[in-house]
Amino acid sequence: MTSGLHSKIPQAVTAFLILAMASASCDVTRAEDKPGFFKKLFGGGGKTETPPAPTPAPKSEPAKTTSKTTSSGKPPRVIITTTGGGSKKKVELNKPTTSTPPKTVAKTESKPEPIKDVTSSARRTEGEFNPDAGDKPSSSKPEAVTVLPANGGWEIVKIGGRDYVTAESIRNFYNPVYGFTTFRVQGNHFWLGSSKLILKAQVGSQELLINNIKFILSFPVQEHNGKVLFSRLDLCKLIDPVLYPSHIENAEYFDTVVVDAGHGGHDAGARGIYGYEKDFALKMAMAVRTALMQRGFKVILTRANDTFISLGGRVAIANQTPKSIFLSFHFNSGGSAATGIETWALTPQSAAATISRGGGYNINGVTGNKQDSANIALATAVHASVISRFKFVDRGIKRAQWSVLTGCKRPGILFEGGFVTNGAECQLVASETYRQQVSAAIGDAVVNYRKALESAMAKR
């Protein structure tokens, strides 16, 4: 794509990134609300926020080499693929040397004395992560080849066998669309900003803020010779699909949403203060169905009552539904102080899950990885829409190999709608008004996501 074509990107792309700017007329604000609501999705005129403090990565001195791809001087259309084939011009980097993946440590919440009527959760008894052989390819594959957007003039730094790209390269490639006016490195903190987009990160951290929406990277941000570095995998599997949702290469039209209410039957899920997760999930699914149908979508429910459906059965329903996407609804559990919203997309191949129980390191890839770009774009649309409208702690868009995602052939996400073990949050979860308002935000997100995909299909 030439720089001229950049300026013609449809409004759907901008709408996708600013879908949450309009304030919703929601009356769910409570005195008990925890801090963490990012009042402005964009930073224009808002209070500057300091990127969150990371858990320092162990300092090591692996071999570091720097190279640079050639540039045509005009940023073209983004090409992202995991095959390395095809007729379109691509810049394919050498595969990183196989190495032991870095351990990803999940954040822990403070856990004061639990509320008396809350028992330990049985929510994972049916195993949201279930290493089913059917989810895996029949034979092992090498590490995924991530292909950078073509002719971007990427400056590549290799650290410990893994490729990283400089923040300057990212700024230069996306500048024709976003018109960046701020590029700053202060200590370990990094800012890249314009009137349309603000990106914040911190060296040593896996947290990335894009318009104050939290993402968890697959690998920590690095620094070399004064330059901030992002892993090539994170650029190709997270940053690019979020900044260029209209360029998702395998985008497919959909008119149907498979809505999955987690747990059910003998699998109650988490026990909360005002009820069980399985019941809240079903009520949320029904509310989401209504919101989606009001917006013109067809909806298939994996369950419409208190019935147990196996994980494989849920995936089968999604895979057998043509022209569809998959939304799985759950609620979280933890100590009584734990609170917030989080959204899960499938772990990319050659990366580790955000948490230890999320399936570990995705070595060989799974069926769902064919939709990596669409998965993260869908997660972004839903998560940003909900977080921007309600005063919830943003726990981030995260990665895991949940079984309902690993075998799914459609774009899919798992949404955790709050903690049923937190008094104030569970009170909201149990509220019909809350469910209707969150469902409306999700419905709007799906509309914006489809617009972005339609824009991508129009570019083929």
Image (cartoon, rainbow, N blue to C red):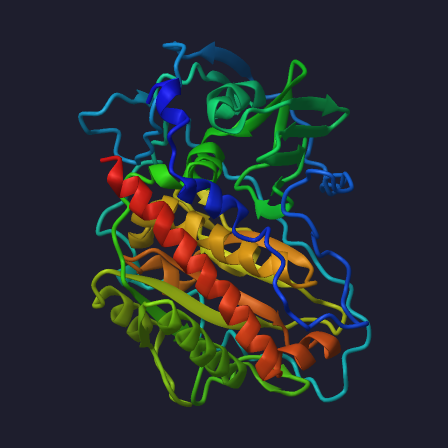
Is residue 211 or residue 313 the one in the foreground? 211
Is residue 168 or residue 359 the one in the foreground? 168
Question: Residue 458, percent across and down?
Answer: 25, 40
Left or right: residue 19 compared with residue 212:
left
On screen, 88 above or below 368?
above
Asked whether residue 162 is in view, the answer is no
Hey, which quadrant is residue 356 in on the image?
A: bottom right
Residue at 47% in and 33% down: 235
Hey, which quadrant is residue 419 in on the image?
A: bottom right
Left or right: residue 9 compared with residue 170:
left
Residue at 50% in and 71% down: 439
Question: Residue 284, percent across and down?
Answer: 49, 77
On screen, 429 above or below 292?
below
Asked whether residue 194 is in view, the answer is yes
Question: Residue 213, percent across and down?
Answer: 61, 48
On screen, 91 above or below 305?
above
Quadrant including the C terminus:
top left
On screen, 199 above or below 307?
above
Quadrant including the N terminus:
top left
